[in-house]
Each structure stands twice: as structure tokens, then as C-alpha cells.
Amino acid sequence: MPDETVWRTMLFDFYGELLTEKQREYFDLHYNSDLSLAEIAESSGISRQGVWDIIRRAEAILRETEEKTGLVARFQAQRETLRGVEGKLAVLERITEGEAQKLTREIMDCLNELKQA
């Protein structure tokens, strides 16, 4: 599993639309824009505790949704598998010639397209 910061960002990217506008805003400001609770509270006109409660509820929703769907975990597993396949293809490309080498490059191009999607 990626580190906690990356994990939170991925959860937000996958499921952020499930949050209320305020939850999305505060979560994004705190974790992605790196604003402190005090900075968010000051600009929003509520207490630091109020900001923290909203962020904590938002994170709970994101984590519960991931527990139920597993989309982020599957995405991560697929990325790791693709990296492994790319590594094996790179080795295969180095040890083959002719048509096999050409086919290996074509497969690597297909994998790169998948990664971009």
C-alpha cells in the first residue's frame, strides 16, 4: 500500500464526488493544498475543531467506500502487475531479435497506452 498521504489523495480522486461540497473543499485544502486547520478555519469562519470534524467525517466516508468497493486497491494491484509485465518485456526485448523484438516493443506500447488511460 502506498504511504498514507498518497493513499488519501487516491481515495479523494476516486471517491471525492461522494462528499459534500464543504467536505470536499476542506479535505482538499488540508491534504492536497497543505493548509493547516487554523488557516481553513480562519477563512471559513468556523473553529479548528469544526474543520477537523468535517475532514475526519470526509475521510471516514472515503475509507468506508473503499472498503466496500475496493476500487483503489484493485487499481494499485493492476498498476503493480503492469510494472512487472513491463519489466519482463524489457528483459525479453533485450534477449530477442527480429520479429520477436518488434512484437515485444508493440506490447510495451500497448501497456503504455493502458497506463495513460
Image (cartoon, rainbow, N blue to C red):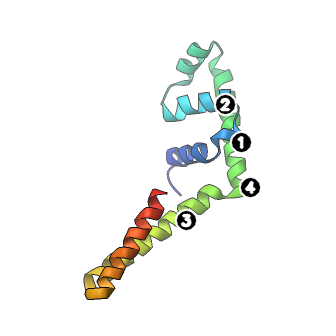
3D distance between C-alphas at marks 2 and 3: 28 Å
Q: Between disc 4 and disc 2, whose residue precedes?
A: 2
| Badge 2 amino acid | Gln
Q: Could you say which is closer to the camera, residue 97 or residue 82?
A: 97
Helix, strand or loop at label 4? It is: helix
| Badge 4 amino acid | Lys
Query: How many residues crowd around disc 2 within 10 Å: few (fewer than 14), some, or many (20 or more)?
Result: many
CB of mark 1 within 8 Å of CB of mark 2? yes
Residue at 38 percent across and 69 percent down: it is: 109
Mark identifier at residue 77: 3
Q: Between disc 1 and disc 2, whose residue precedes?
A: 2
CB of mark 2 within 8 Å of CB of mark 3? no
Residue at 48 percent across and 66 percent down: it is: 80
Q: Could you say which is closer to the camera, residue 50 or residue 91?
A: 91
CB of mark 1 within 8 Å of CB of mark 3? no
Left or right? Give the position of 33 relative to 102: right
In the rendered image, residue 2, in percent from the top left (x then y), is placed at 50, 54
Residue at 67 percent across and 47 percent down: it is: 63
| Badge 1 amino acid | Ile
Q: Between disc 2 and disc 3, whose residue precedes?
A: 2
- Read off the residue under disc 2: 23
Helix, strand or loop at label 1? It is: helix
In the rendered image, residue 17, in percent from the top left (x then y), is placed at 66, 39
- Read off the residue under disc 1: 61
Query: How many residues crowd around disc 3 within 10 Å: few (fewer than 14), some, or many (20 or more)?
Result: few
CB of mark 4 within 8 Å of CB of mark 2? no
In the rendered image, residue 84, in percent from the top left (x then y), is placed at 43, 72
| Badge 3 amino acid | Ala
